[in-house]
Image: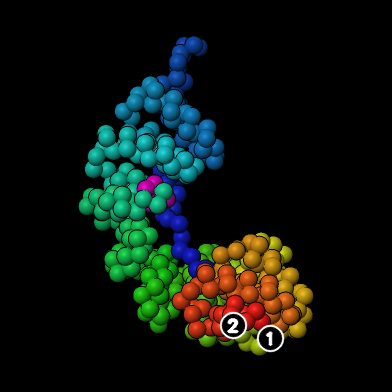
Amino acid sequence: MASRSIRAGMTALALWALLGASAFAEPTRVAHAHAQPSAESLWQQGRQAAAHGSLDEAVRYYQLSLVKDPQRVSTLADLAGALADLERWDEAREAFERWLAHAPTDADALNGLGYVHYRQKRYGQAITFYRRALAQRDDPQFHLNLGLALLGQERWGEAEDQFDATLSIDPNSYWALNDRGYVLEQQGQLDDAADSYEAACRVAKQDITAHLNFGGLLLEQSEPAEAAWIFRDALKRQERSADAHLGFAMSLDELGRPDEAYLETRVVLALNPRNPSAFHLLAALEKERHHWANAIAAIDRAIALDDHNAGYHLMRGQLLQADGRTRSAMADYARYVALAPDEARNSEAALALRIWRETGR
């Protein structure tokens, strides 16, 4: 199954989305036919464009407004938000910095700048700005964002504290429950992680990240029946999720239902033909059927998509060795040992490779 994920960051920063329809009212018309638009009217046109999803056009209007009035904080705020939504990170960072120059204690500006640093993987700077935002306002979203930045530095305990702080304000925060489960899992607290994922699943609406995380953990704990139930529940929410179908296929395989697992794996590849994990599972299922050529073809596809997965090379080595292609098998065993030296140290693959190198057989 694809590695379990946490969300990339906070929700979109488009500040106009928080405003009512009156914010998009037609600007007052001026009497003179050739009058130049004001900073106010350009800003309003930008907000109208943003409300209709035309963010590039909104940015253009905001920039024109700022030519007229470079210190207009509301325009700087909307420009920063639009640029962040467009993932134009360097420009967004500059806009947030301009906003902060005029409003140095604005919690939303501090949080927004932290978000831009986070998305650019500058976790230290993100942490600094999130903490400054929290000094101005105790906001559950700020705690959540700070937790994610700490998680980026693998500061698991501190991240957990921030997710707990979010939950103390909003006990049903889906992302806080999911992300708390993730950091607990990283710290080896698997039962607590499962509880947190399960709680996230209970409050989930359409998002299935927590389902994927919980199902994956259950598979690792050798509980395929429970995992299958979780993945089925995920598919009720997102029936075309390749990851949910893959988790369900893996659960079926663990439950000793290979024919159903095979069909589910084919569904995964129909939805996402570039999923290396699905090809790896398909190879295992073809191997169980003793369809060696099909199994090798499937694992070849997995490796073509992800050449740095040690497990894929191990499987191909095993398949090639069973097929009598010893030299090619040893090349894959060597790659397996290079990619996962600790795991491979006492493995049968490493032993076979050592014997082959010493004896040529």
Q: Name the amino acid type tagged 1.
A: Arg
Q: Position of residue 99 (x, y in %)?
A: 32, 36
Q: Is residue 129 left or right of residue 258?
A: left
Which quarter of the image is occupied by the C terminus?
bottom right
Q: Position of residue 47 (x, y in %)?
A: 46, 35
Q: Is residue 308 left or right of residue 137?
A: right
Name the outermost residue toward the front: 359
Characterize the local packing of mark 1: few (<14), some (14-19) or many (20 or more) Cα atoms within 10 angstroms: few
Q: Residue at x 75, y 84 (%)?
A: 289
Q: Residue at x 50, y 12 (%)?
A: 33
The dot on residue 147 is none
Q: Name the amino acid type tagged 2.
A: Ile
Front-most of residues 204 and 274: 274
Q: Which residue is mark 2?
A: 355
Q: Secondary structure at mark 2?
A: helix
Of the two numbered discs 2 and 1 in the rendering, the one whose residue sits closer to the viewer: 2
Q: Residue at x 45, y 49 (%)?
A: 12
Look at the picture and state if 112 lies above or below 38.
Answer: below
Characterize the local packing of mark 2: few (<14), some (14-19) or many (20 or more) Cα atoms within 10 angstroms: few
Q: Position of residue 258 (x, y in %)?
A: 70, 83
Look at the picture and state if 33 lies above or below 340.
Answer: above
Q: Is residue 232 left or right of residue 346?
A: right
* Marks 2 and 1, the one that precedes in the sequence: 1
Asked whether the beta carbons under mark 2 and mark 1 sit within 8 Å of each other, the answer is: no
Look at the picture and state if 183 lies above or below 18.
Answer: below
Q: Can residue 166 be seen in this snapshot?
A: no
Residue extent of the magenta highlight:
115-119
Measure the alpha-carbon separation of dots 2 and 1: 37 Å
Q: Which residue is mark 1?
A: 257
Q: Position of residue 249 (x, y in %)?
A: 64, 77
Front-most of residues 199 and 193: 193
Q: Secondary structure at mark 1?
A: loop
